[in-house]
Image (spheres, grey):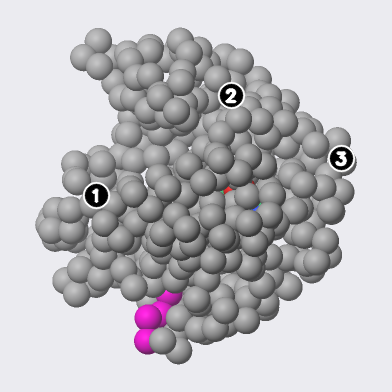
Amino acid sequence: MLILVIGQGAREHAITHTLLLDPNVEVVCAPGNPGISQIARIDVVHINEISSVVDLAKKHKPDLVVIGPEAPLVAGVADELRSAGFTVFGPSKAAAALEGSKAFAKEIMQAAGVPTADSKYCQTIAQARAALELFGAPYVVKDDGLAAGKGVVVTVDFEVAVAHALACIDSRDGGAVVIEEFLDGPEVSLFGVSDGTTIVPLTPAQDFKRVGDNDQGPNTGGMGAYSPLPWAPENFVSDVTRTVLQPVIDEMNRRGTPFVGLLFAGLAITARGVRVIEFNARFGDPETQVVLARLNSSLSELLLAAATGKLASLVELEWKPESAVTVVMAAGGYPESPVAGAVITGVKLAEESGTVVYHAGTKTNDAGELLVTGGRVLSVTALGSDLSVARTQAYSGVERIEFEGEHHRSDIALKAALGEIRLGDQHG
Ligand code: AMP
Ligand code: GLY
């Protein structure tokens, strides 16, 4: 089976790596990255240009196309590929609006009876100020459109909240901001794979959004993750599937815009129960690196069954009992102003020490050196008999890799490994 994977991050590297565990699978990845090029064929494509992606598919004639990032999904790449006759894992433009518009996601949740934070959609700064006063501190201010995980500001400073609201409203024509109630409690990322009717939950993971240890500093795309969550409530996955994932799939179906692909629920476990923070319409990064590390079933069969409407007849997924931890190594200046160009050394040593190093912000130069190109540079991933062993292993890989300006969190999975997460805590 030939699979075309669209994307170039650590998520796509992990997806490609896991797909290739099936002996009958071949992968072409576009545009890929230097890590992916070591395990799969690479081709070039502008992933947000619909016609280029369709031309690429016509060239390779894959049995399945897997679209990694949100931008091509929100642009409608999946729709055009389907019209051209391809089998696609990834939602239509209409269904990807669950991620592309926070206001649309709220509307679907309301219609489906899914618990989420109370919120106000504001198109003027006067509306935004009123909403901030209504909900009170801490203030949660979200750009309505796509912002690569960086459009959200959570602050106790009223003026900082107002400034971000203004920036969102002014960012483009029709710019808007969503202001909402603060949700207190540890966060969980739960992915569900759907064929539009059935949704199969994956194993939950926890992401670390803030750039610094102890959740200090600005939000990022995610600085690390681990799975499983020993502290999660009993029946967490089945409860969330029943109260969140399936109702959203049903509501999208009812509207004639079925969601085929990966529905990612970002959840907060609050004192009043589970609340949805956001939906994404694709695999999370870096959560995918740990979720797929624990998958003991065929990923290609799962994604193909979803893309062809056959999930109801798929055998139940199996998960490894081991724990997985991934640590993101970021470029100097990330997230505000990442610096490119530093030479990366030690990746091979880290791999030899038993970690899997997924590439994201890297490229090679003519001299064969590996260079930093972007914010989240590498995801160093390890499995271990428990979280503590997995994190020791992941950090021993991190220690072997060096580049100028490199920074990473040193507390990924730490509280969970120490058994220090109690429900009701503000953050994991
Ligand atoms: P989002 O892009 O919506 O996932 O938001 C990014 C991050 O901001 C989340 O992972 C949370 O850490 C934080 N956040 C978003 N919404 C809320 C909320 N209502 N209450 C508390 N924290 C939030
Ligand atoms: N790690 C969060 C995300 O992928 O949006």
The amino acid type, in three-letter code, at marker 1 is: Ile
Q: Which mark is residue 398?
A: none
Is 328 displayed left or right of 418 in the figure?
left
Among the 4 quarters of the image, the one containing residue 396? top right
Which of the two residues, 110 or 125, is positioned nearer the viewer here?
A: 125
Crowding at mark 2 (Cα within 10 Å: few <14, some 14-19, many 20+): many
The residue sitting at 63% across, 56% down in the picture is 133
Can residue 272 be seen here? yes
Considering only vertical position in the picture, is 25 above or below 221? Answer: below
Residue drawn where x is 80% and y is 66% of the image = 272
Residue 68 or residue 49, whichever sits in front:
49
- Can you give x and y, in whole percent of width and height, for residue 74 in the image? 32, 61
Distance between the Cα atoms at labels 3 and 1? 42 Å
Q: Crowding at label 3, few (<14), some or many (≥20) Cα neighbours within 10 Å?
A: few
Residue of label 2: 408
Which label belongs to residue 47?
1
User: On the image, numbered disc 3 is attached to which residue?
Assistant: 420
